Each structure stands twice: as C-alpha cells, then as structure tokens.
C-alpha cells in the first residue's frame, strides 16, 4: 500500500510530490482543524473512499482512475497528486494494428433461428411424407390394387377371392377371410358372388373367365367406396 502523509494545521496542507499509478490505493493522514464533512466533500469524486479517525487525525484511503494531476481541494487548500498510466509505449502501439482491417475479428451474427426453423420444417415435411406413405400402404384399396396387379394367373381364383375379402375386412373390420359372410353394406347378390368366388377354387369344372370375376369384384369395391365417402 502506497501512503502519503498530510499534516493539516491551521488550514495548511503539505503536498507530497510522489507519482502514483492508476488504480493504486492511496492513503493520507490529515491532522488539524478539519471536519469529516469537509473531507467527505473533498474526496467525493474518487473511488473506494474510506475515512476513519484515530486519535487527533483522519486516515483517508482512496483510489483514482483519472490519469494526470489530481487536484483535491480541502477548504482553501489544494493537494496535487500525479497519477500515471500503467500502459507503456509498446502497449499503445498495439492500437495501431487495429487500424489494419486484416487484424480485425468480426463476430458474425449467424441466423441460428432461421437454420433451426429450416431443420424443424424439413423434419416435419419428411415425417409427413413417411406417414403418408405408411397410410397409403395400409389403405385397403391400394392393397387390393397391388394384389390384382401382381396376381398369379395360375392361382387367380385363390388370390382374387383373398384380395376381395381382405379389402372388405380392412375397411369394415369384418371377418370375411374367416368365412363369416355377414355385412349389412353388402347385398344378397354380393354375398353370393363372394361365396361363389371362394368356392370356385375348389371346383375343377368351374368358369375360368378371370376378367369377368375381376370386373364384378371391382364393381362391389367401387360401390362400397362411394357409399363410404357419402357416410
């Protein structure tokens, strides 16, 4: 701690001409006919001011961040304290480099919110496409069309019967695949056709007109789909 001692007698003050660095803690001892209020007023512009009284003297400690000669007026007397900067010539030369644009570090304001929104939006689009594909693949009508498109002509009786009954069960949660032909959406003729198509695979001398049965099967499906849209 750097100190400077002042003897204040009959409003006279002896200044100690020592140099101090910016931010140093400076301590003064003031004696004489002086009040604490006068001291507080004199050191009001400074930082970390602490005033204590010991016997017949005041001990004042303070910090100054003002470079140059600091004038402290107590009563009619001025105290001069010289405050020096801690920067050297070499430190000051660093500022010259800042004038060169190549030495500047530019903080870029990246559009994080925009990028984040784009990623979330892209994820939702992909998720929607996946859900659409899954829904389409589970759609009974799409399954029926896929089965008919890939039908094996040597086994068309089995596969057409299966495809029609699988469509009905998929749409109405019925049990046509288990042989329970009971659905109020179908007419008596529809039920008879499904039974005939189901039994056809067991008959050796049965009708082999695939297109006729496929057309009738599609008529039933189209009627059911139309009725379902109107419900």
Image (cartoon, rainbow, N blue to C red):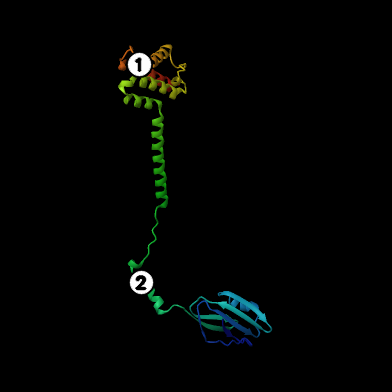
Residue shown at 39%/61% (left/top)? Answer: 107
Residue on which the image places disc 2: 97
For residue 189, above or below residue 126: above
Relative placement, left or right, of 65 versus 123 is right
- Identify the image quadrant of residue 217: top left
Q: Nearer the viewer, residue 103 or 168?
A: 168
Q: Is residue 142 left or right of residue 40?
A: left
Q: Which residue is mark 1?
A: 216
Image vertical order of residue 13 relative to residue 46, above or below? below
**Residue 82: mark:** none
Residue 124: image location, x then y, percent: 41, 41
Q: Secondary structure at mark 2?
A: helix
Relative depth, front residue between 199 and 182: 199
* Quadrant assignment, res 91: bottom left
Quadrant location of the C terminus?
A: top left
> How many C-alpha atoms fall within 10 Å of the one at disc 2: few (<14), some, or many (≥20)?
few
Residue 228: percent from left, percent from top: 43, 21
66 and 202: which is toward the camera: 202
Please state, as top left, top right, bottom left or bottom right, where the N terminus lies in the image: bottom right
Asked whether the beta carbons under mark 1 and mark 2 sit within 8 Å of each other, the answer is no
Tell me: residue 30, above or below residue 131: below
Residue under the image location 42 percent in, 50 percent down: 113
Q: Secondary structure at mark 1?
A: helix
Q: Earlier in the sequence, mark 1 or mark 2?
A: 2
Q: What is the x, y in percent for residue 208? A: 31, 15
Q: Residues within 10 Å of mark 1 (few under 14, many from 20)?
A: some
Q: In the image, residue 203 lies at what x, y percent?
A: 36, 13
Front-most of 206 and 99?
A: 206
Inter-mark Cα distance, 1 to 2: 89 Å
């Amino acid at each position: 701690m750097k100190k400077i001692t002042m003897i204040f007698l009959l409003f006279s003050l002896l200044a100690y001409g020592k140099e101090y660095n910016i931010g140093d803690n400076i301590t003064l001892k003031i004696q004489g006919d002086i009040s604490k209020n006068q001291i507080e007023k004199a050191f009001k512009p400074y930082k970390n001011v602490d005033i204590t009284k010991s016997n017949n003297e005041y001990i004042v400690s303070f910090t100054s961040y003002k470079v140059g000669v600091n004038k402290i007026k107590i009563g009619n007397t001025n105290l001069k304290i010289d405050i020096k900067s801690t920067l050297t010539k070499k430190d000051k030369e660093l500022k010259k480099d800042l004038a060169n644009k190549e030495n500047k570090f530019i903080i870029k304001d990246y559009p994080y919110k925009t990028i984040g929104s784009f990623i979330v939006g892209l994820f939702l689009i992909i998720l929607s496409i996946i859900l659409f594909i899954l829904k389409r693949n589970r759609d009974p009508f799409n399954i029926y069309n896929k089965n008919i498109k890939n039908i094996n002509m040597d086994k068309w009786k089995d596969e057409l019967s299966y495809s029609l009954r699988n469509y009905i069960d998929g749409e109405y949660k019925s049990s046509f695949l288990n042989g329970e032909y009971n659905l109020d959406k179908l007419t008596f003729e529809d039920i008879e056709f499904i039974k005939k198509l189901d039994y056809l695979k067991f008959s050796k001398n049965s009708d082999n007109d695939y297109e006729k049965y496929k057309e009738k099967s599609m008529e039933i499906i189209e009627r059911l789909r139309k009725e379902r849209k109107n419900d």
